[in-house]
Amino acid sequence: MVDTLLAPFEMLGDAVAIGSSDARDVLGMTVALQRLVRTEDEPIGDWPVLLMRLEALCADDDSACSLTECRLEGGYPLVRIAACQRDVQAYLAERDDLFLTSRTVSVSEMATTLAHELNQPLGTLSNLLGGLKIRHDRGNLPPDVLSGAITDARDQTRFAQNVIARIRDFTASRRPEPRTLDLVDLVERSAALLDWLLRSAGTQVLIRRTTTSVRVHGDRTMLQQVLINLLRNAVEAMRDRAVMTRRIDVVIGCNGERATIAIIDRGSGIAGSEAMLFVPFASGKPDGMGVGLNICRSFLELHQGRLWLTGNDEGGCTSHIELPLQMNEGRDG
């Protein structure tokens, strides 16, 4: 219920908290408010303590914040902080910087596999043209052979163009655009962006849902980057496994008012490395930058979601994603 009450404020980016009807406990707060009261201590769960913290914040002339309180139907207290425009702009700049950093990291990690994928059609084109040149010079180039070679060359060119177009769309610079998304469609499109990596690694991706419709509200590219990063990690984790066992299961479902995604690999697991998973710049990959999981977690937190990793019965790792379900219908991205 609290998530439903907070959802409109979350979409607007408002700093809002809701308390229990007896005004004793904090039932929930938006990300914007969490940023204002962020602390190294335990999260604030006491409503009077939260009010004191917010009143102190607004009393600071440098904050330029104002506090408003009201009661919702059912007697639930609601408090809202109106921040100055300077704070809003700083938050948007911070979010965009994170967005751009993630795209840079993703493109860097895709570079090797992208080059491999483009080498295939370019190599085929080179062989076709070389063969045609030899047969032309010998005067032995029947029209049907020429026609077939042109058709093959056109198909390979289109294939290369499609690869480039997918990456261009993925890395296009723009501001985040939240909208209603179908998670099954999002997972399928994310796997399609990694089709060349999956083929070269001999890895299958099996996607299944446990419910008919799983919709969330968020930015397509941000969430797509999370999925691509986790899928790529799963592929890399199974490099040393037998080809017939290289399979990633992606299970999409619901848990109450939360959408869930489980990405299950059959790699070496995470035993012994749990403490280092989200440590910045600590990477288990020889060419990794050690920021991928941190960016994934940050993006999901911006969407009121969370990310955690566990071992699984297959001996590998399972990446768990939770996001608030979109309760109302809206347009798909």
Image (cartoon, grey):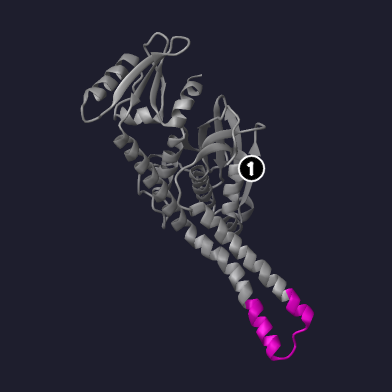
On screen, 329 above or below 97? Answer: above
The answer to whether residue 43 shows anywhere in this view is no
Residue 138 lies in the magenta stretch: yes
On screen, 59 above or below 126? Answer: above
Query: Where is residue 173 drawn, in percent x and y?
Result: 45, 52
Residue 149 lies in the magenta stretch: no
Q: Quadrant of residue 30?
A: top left
* Number of dots carrying numbers: 1
Q: Residue at x 54, y 42 (%)?
A: 315
The answer to whether residue 170 shows anywhere in this view is yes
On screen, 333 above or below 153? Answer: above
Q: The magenta stretch spans which residues?
A: 127-148
Which quarter of the figure is the C terminus placed in? top right
Other-residue count near label 1 (Cα within 10 Å), few / some / many at <14 / 14–19 / ≥20: some
Residue at which label 1 appears: 207
User: Mainly helix, strand or loop, the magenta region?
Assistant: helix
- Which of the pair 245/220 is nearer the observer? 220
Q: Residue at x 26, y 29 (%)?
A: 64
Q: Quadrant of residue 330?
A: top right
Q: Residue at x 44, y 26 (%)?
A: 9
Callout 1 secondary element: strand
Instruction: Locate residue 131 relative to residue 295 in the image: left or right.
Output: right
On screen, 215 above or below 67? Answer: below
Q: Residue furthest left?
A: 61
- Which of the pair 122/74 is nearer the observer? 74
Q: Amino acid at mark 1?
A: Ile
Query: Where is residue 232 drawn, in percent x and y?
Result: 52, 51
Q: Residue furthest front?
A: 85
